[in-house]
Each structure stands twice: as structure tokens, then as C-alpha cells.
Image (tube, rainbow, N blue to C red):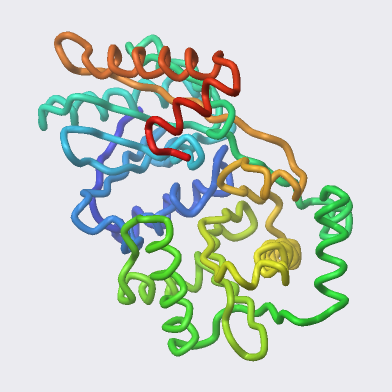
Amino acid sequence: MRWEIITNYPNIDLEKKWFDFMPTSTYPCHYTSPGFFNEPFWENRNPFAVLVFDKDKVSGVLTGLHTEKKIVSGLAVRPQVSIAKNGNQKAVAAALGEALFSMAKSSGDELVSVYCSEQIEGFEELGFSVKKSGGSFQVMMLDLTAGKDKTFKGFSQTRRSDLRKAMRENKVRISQIENLEELEELHQIHLDWCSRKQIEPDDFETMKKVYLQKDSVRIFIAKHDGKIIAGSYFRYYPKALIEYAGNNSIPEYQRLRPNELLVWKSIEWACNNEIPLYSMGASHPFLQRFGGEPVSSYRYQLDCTFLKKHTKKEAVTDFMIKTYQSLPVEMRHKIKKILGKE
């Protein structure tokens, strides 16, 4: 097998080989497809892809970012590695590892982190440590193959009741965003939402570029009396996987259940478009009430520093978290108050 690293959207020949690979792969999502390079979020973050070839066919793909002396492929809740289902997994892992070693060595990188949707034979033999995600780093995954009605029955009783009531009252209209005027209105909600959460917002031009990716992105909005009160963002790869990517909403309208309706309408859309899997992108209680199963990813990490400083730092952090979680609830509340977290 051979490997190739690219840092821009592939040429026509490579694009075809890559797309031919997608239906045969273990994790066919938008970020393991050529469309990864069209994302506006990667500006100045050095996106790259490693393609592994078995003879002349793509047999494995890894995408990621290369910044600040680190190589990172995906997140615990968003794996970005896919391998041919009937391929030689160990050989593909060896080729991916060789490519990552080459990148790290040439740039003097300190840390390589790769998130996979499944355990991959071969990475540990190359010196990568493995860590299975758990708790809040899992994602709720829905199987949509049985259709929307059976999927709805899998929701919690509370979620079904809330949705039925919201649909019966008919105070909120859900639709896909239709024009730039609606996008501007949603962007204002995004700005307010980010201000409340104290995080950096995306500018309108970035949101516009996302909106224009009609072959991989869907934006659903909730309107009440003609006013947008919430919006949700979804990535998808046709006939494979849809991912819940984010939500912005106005707090005072939560009683109308716009966010619940937005997810339900996206599930209906996915079922109508023959998408078999739905990743909620996280596993907090709001998402758990839509049913599905909690799914773990696997992180393979290589600490390239002489004294393994990143590994040691993480070990200390993990120990502190476990110690905190073992404390009585009252003591945890006291610590939060001291730290100003309550």
C-alpha cells in the first residue's frame, strides 16, 4: 500500500477515486469525504487529508488539521477516519501511521491525535496509545432504517408528549432556511447566543459559505408569528450519515419546544432521503431523550516530546477529575463556589 497527503481539494481523478471509496467505507461522513476541504471553518488551520491506496483504489482516509505543533484528526464526538470495509485494516493503519510520522517529523510536531469510530488494529503497534471515550464524550446514534414512525416511538415518553403537544398547538413552523434575509436573522440569534455562552461567534460571511454548501449542509429554522426563534445546523453525507452540528435559539421561546421540533423535522428529512444513521454529536440529556444508543470513539495518540509532557499532563488532569468525581456532592458544590462556577 502507498499513501498520499493532500492539503487542497483533490483533482478530478483523485476526487472520483475518493468518492468511489465512500460507499465501501466504515464511516462515510461529510468530513471523511472530499467536501472536508470546502469547510470555511478551516481557514488558517491547515486542513489536510491522508489517502491510502491499495493498488489504484482508495482503501483508507484520514482528515485533520495541522496547527500549533499538533496534528489533530477529528474529535471524540466526531471521528474523521474511514477504512474500506473489506480492506486490510492493519495495513491501512500502518500506512496512515507512516504518513502521520512523516508530517510530524518534517514539522517538528509535539502531538498527534487521531479519533476513530472503532478500534483499529495496528495503531498501538506503531506506538500510539489508545483511549476509549466515555460519558459526555460519547454520542447518541440513531438507526433510522426502520423509518420515522418507529424512530419516534423510540423517543422518551416526555419527548413524545412534548412534541405531540407542540405540533397540536401549531405555534411554531419548521422549514429549511430559504434565503439570505432569513440567514441574517438567524445570524443575529447566533451572535446573541454566543454572547451568552461567552464564546467567539462565526461572522456572517462564514455562515453564508456554510449555507451555500447545499450538497452537505441543511439549516432548519423555527418561526413563531413570522419571527425566527431558533435554528439548527446539520452536516450530512448522502445515503450514509447525518450529524447534528449545532443550534442557536432565543431562550424566552423555549416553552414552544422549537429545538425539539427542529431535531424531529431533521429526522423526518433524513428518513425521507434514505439516510440510515443519525449522529446527535453529543450525549447530554436533551439528546438522550431522542433515543438511540450511546456510542464511543477511540483516540489514538502519539506524544512526540522527549519527556512525554502531554501524556504526563493528561494523566494529572485525569487523576484530578476522578478525585473530584469521587468527592461527596456537598463538597463538590463547595469547590465550585470557591472557583466561581456556581
Q: Quadrant of residue 80?
A: top left
Quadrant of the frame with the N terminus: top left
Please provide percent x and percent y for residue 67. 19, 41
Residue at 54% of width from left, 19% of height from top?
325
177, above or below 249, in the image: below
Residue at 53% of width from left, 33% of height from top?
137
Please provide percent x and percent y for residue 177. 55, 80
Q: Left or right? Give the position of 206 relative to 171.
A: left
Please provide percent x and percent y for residue 335. 45, 25
Residue at 66% of width from left, 51% of height from top?
278
Residue at 65% of width from left, 80% of height from top?
175
Q: Left or right? Give the position of 335 relative to 259.
A: left
Comparing 57 with 327, the one in front is 327
Q: Left or right? Give the position of 244 relative to 78.
A: right
137, above or below 160, in the image: above
Q: What is the count of numbered marks?
A: 0
205, above or below 132, in the image: below
Comparing 46 with 6, the one in front is 46
